[in-house]
Amino acid sequence: MTTQAMPTVAARVAGAVKVYGTGDTAVRALDGVDVSFAAGRFTAIMGPSGSGKSTLMHCAAGLDTLTSGAAYIGDTELGGLDDRRLTRLRRDRIGFVFQAFNLVPTLTVAENITLPLDLAGARGEPAWIETLIDVVGLRDRLAHRPSELSGGQQQRVAVARALAGQPDVVFADEPTGNLDSRSGQEVLGLLGHAVHTLGRTVVMVTHDPVAAAHADEVVFLADGRLVDRMPAPSAERVLDRMKHLDAPGTGAVQAAGGTLEARS
Ligand SMILES: Nc1ncnc2c1ncn2[C@@H]1O[C@H](COP(=O)(O)OP(=O)(O)O)[C@@H](O)[C@H]1O
Ligand SMILES: [Mg+2]
């Protein structure tokens, strides 16, 4: 027996297959993925465009359903839940951050942050909300509307909103995709702080090696399969790994060769 406890798993998928469409036009977006996301860790999902990153996140978070296999939040298998229970699980146990911020334009910053709690009829923990407001640095913007904020500020509101209910896991899909690099760094710093100081769990989809380097671990997808994991990533090593994923010896390389041949 080892004395080291197994890390608690916040979310996982097992044998995850997702097929979009049928017949000739069917796309196998996930082709048998097994991956778990440890609680209290910041994990990045990396891979080329179209490799299945968003699909994996959406299925792991109960926003979409698997064709076969299973997705779990903690010990709860999502496929076993009816719509009402699934909605409640997403509301109570998962936070979301999207590339496009998705704030409600008619609500103030303060109202946007507590919206998930208000919808749930929950009060939340006032001290936690106060902490979040300070952590995201928006105390002097609480009465503002999203249109009065920069993109980076809007995404910081979205991060606070995702954390407001103290969810088991926050899923973020390309959260820096619409931001300049400085605002992006702020948002990434915030997600890291949420994990390393506030003890939350974050799973972030990105195709940016610099963003992925903020995570504790990177998992790599290619063609709907999990192909590698990298603990303690650096942007350089992630970039290097990605170069090999982008040139799998088929598509990109052959196409490039074909172009050269055609020109010579
Ligand atoms: N709703 C959908 N209908 C049909 N095909 C889809 C749908 N969503 C994604 N796909 C396809 O599934 C594959 C994986 O997509 P996605 O998970 O969005 O990749 P990524 O986020 O890594 O760019 C791609 O080939 C994409 O075109
Ligand atoms: Mg995507």
Image (cartoon, rainbow, N blue to C red):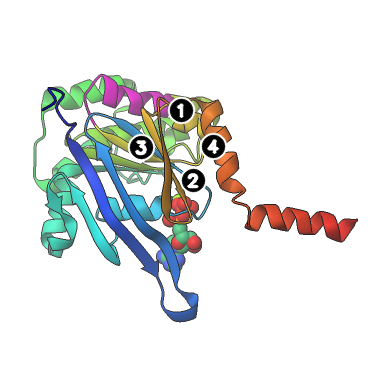
The residues bearing labels 4 and 1 have C-alpha atoms spaced at a distance of 12 Å
User: Which of marks 1 and 2 precedes in the sequence?
Assistant: 2
Q: Give the range drawn in magenta.
A: 186-200
In this rendering, would 25 be left or right of 124?
right
User: Which of marks 4 and 2 precedes in the sequence?
Assistant: 2
- Contact between marks 4 and 1 (CB within 8 A): the answer is no
The residues bearing labels 3 and 1 have C-alpha atoms spaced at a distance of 32 Å
User: Which of marks 3 and 2 precedes in the sequence?
Assistant: 2
Residue identifier under label 3: 145
Taking 160 as reference, is 63 above or below it?
below
Q: Which of marks 2 and 4 is in front?
A: 4
- Type of amino acid at the residue the image marks with label 2: Gly
In this rendering, would 79 be left or right of 170?
left
Q: Nearer the viewer, mark 4 or mark 1?
A: 4
- Type of amino acid at the residue the image marks with label 4: Arg
The residues bearing labels 2 and 3 have C-alpha atoms spaced at a distance of 35 Å
Q: Where is residue 134 in the image (x, y as percent from the top left)?
A: 27, 19
The residues bearing labels 2 and 4 have C-alpha atoms spaced at a distance of 10 Å
Say which mark, if any, is on residue 213: 1
Residue name at image x 59 percent, y 47 percent: 246
- Contact between marks 3 and 1 (CB within 8 A): the answer is no
Taking 81 as reference, is 72 above or below it?
above
User: Quarter of the image holding residue 7?
Assistant: top left
- Type of amino acid at the residue the image marks with label 1: Ala
User: Which of marks 1 and 3 precedes in the sequence?
Assistant: 3
User: Which of marks 3 and 4 precedes in the sequence?
Assistant: 3
User: Quarter of the image holding residue 188?
Assistant: top left
Say which mark, if any, is on residue 241: 4
Residue identifier under label 2: 47
Q: Where is residue 220 in the image (x, y as percent from the top left)?
A: 44, 43
User: Which of marks 1 and 4 precedes in the sequence?
Assistant: 1
Q: Nearer the viewer, mark 4 or mark 3?
A: 4
